[in-house]
Image (cartoon, rainbow, N blue to C red):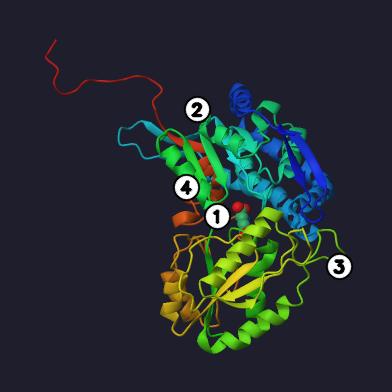
Amino acid sequence: MADAIISYEPATGAELWSGAIGDADAEVGAARAGWARWAAQPLTVRIETMRRFGNVVRQRHEAFADLLARETGKPLWEARTEIDSVIAKVDISVSAYAERTAQRRLESPMGSRMALRHKPHGVLAVLGPYNFPVHLPNGHIVPALLAGNAVVFKPSEKTPASGAFLVDCYRAAGVPEACVRLLIGGPAEGKALADHDDIDGLLFTGSARTGLALNRAFAAKPEKILALEMGGNNPIIVWDTPDLHSAAVLVIQSAFTTAGQRCTAARRLIVEDRLYEPLIDAICAMVGRLIVGSPHDDPQPFMGPVIDNDVADQLSESFLALLMRGGRPIRHLERTVADRPFLTPALIDMTAATEHPDIELFGPILQVYRAADFDAAIALANTTRYGLSAALVSQTPALYDRFWAGIRAGIVNWNRPTNGASSSAPFGGIGWSGNHRPSAYYAADYCAYPVVSNEAEAARANIGIGLRDA
Ligand code: UN1
């Protein structure tokens, strides 16, 4: 069917869902017709509606987690945490919105009252990713709706069912149909939405390649806002630490959670020379015990398949390309089930490689480097155009001070994984990781614009200088 998007379960290949491809123009038109009424409601009404949305998701928690696990392949335990994050985002967004957009009195040199107030943009487009198909778009949609915008949401063509379920929850909570529109489609529909003249802005989560193209297109439209949350080539450094078991756990959580399909996943491990052998041994021993399996397996797997066979094939090719560049395999990337995208976690030593591609390998592949000197390790960590997250595993506070000062990233962690960023903190990165901090705490900044209001109740005015006597 050329006019439908079909979603397949990565673990089984079974068809999960299908839906007709939508029309960007119709969805933007519907949102445009509806947004002003929503914006005219008191903020308290929109807050109550979002709280009801949280309750709807709470009631549908298990059904939602089940669908999300099937559609993404992520284990059920992890799908449940994603649904928890969707619920938690409501309270976080309400308080962040209140703080970021609080009406403020400003000092006025003219003697009048001066205030800073905020207005919604109007119609905001949201393009979602497949790794967190509900948590990340929800992190844009909730603040956008709170601020009084209407939203046109296009989920990834790999995860439309989860997107449709999310939109149904907003509507069940009482968000007017006109104010939260679902656009089903692939790249063509995404482009039609992003290029549409009648959107006021775009909130994007996805690859740097698409994000950079959007950035070029939006450069010609300064009147529209663009929030980009792209990816990372995130480093984790292990240096001067006696507890190699914990170090190995942190590395594995950073690199292989969600089968490596997180923008904050560690892609590069940089290890102090003297810790190299024992650390790699500890990692490999544990990786050998990690369960890779289907989302509903009992016992639950550590990680599921990657999103589909195409992605698995591309990752296999990328791994081969690293070998061709002189990488030394520590653990190969293997397909465990024929024709299904289950991959085993892979490690490859790139210390002596001839080339170091600065790309985001969005899967369970960790590139490893050994370094003799801490400054060289930081310099190596910084050899990327991205800058989303970075972590140091070390017992030495002075090393963290140097790491923090020297590393270029939006999220810098000490004895914590590179991923699992708090939803109540500003989220985003520098360089190719995005423009500013478009998610979580600062999301409100992208959903409402500040207006200076100079106020005097009566017009009492004199020209002053330059006026002849009457
Ligand atoms: C991650 O940690 O891998 O709410 C993603 C947010 C962030 C997303 C984190 N907590 O936008």
- Check disc 2 and report its element: helix, strand or loop: loop
Q: Is residue 379 toward the left or the right of residue 17 in the image?
A: left
Q: Quadrant of ligand 1?
A: bottom right
- Residue 63 in the image: state x and y as whole percent: 84, 47
How many residues crowd around disc 2 within 10 Å: few (fewer than 14), some, or many (20 or more)? few
Q: Position of residue 47 (x, y in %)?
A: 66, 38
* Percent coordinates x, y for residue 293 in the rendering: 80, 64
Task: Please tell me which residue lies in front, 461 or 153.
Answer: 153
Residue 243 seen in this snapshot: no
Q: CA distance from mark 2 to mark 1?
A: 28 Å
Q: Nearer the viewer, mark 1 or mark 3?
A: 3
**Residue labelled with disc 3:** 299
Q: Which residue is rendered at x = 60% and y = 87% of the image?
A: 277
Mark 3 neighbour density, 10 Å: few (under 14) some (14–19) many (20 or more): few
Amino acid type assigned to the residue bearing label 1 in the image: Phe
Image coordinates for residue 21, horizontal then vertical, percent: 69, 32
Mark earlier in primary sequence (3, 4): 4
- Residue underneath mark 4: 212
Going from N to C along the chain, the mark reached first, 2 or 1, is 2
The residue beneath circle 1 is: 427
What element does badge 1 sit on?
strand
Gap in angstroms between the C-alphas marked 3 and 4:
41 Å
Q: Nearer the viewer, mark 4 or mark 2?
A: 4
- Position of 180 relative to 416 (above/below): above
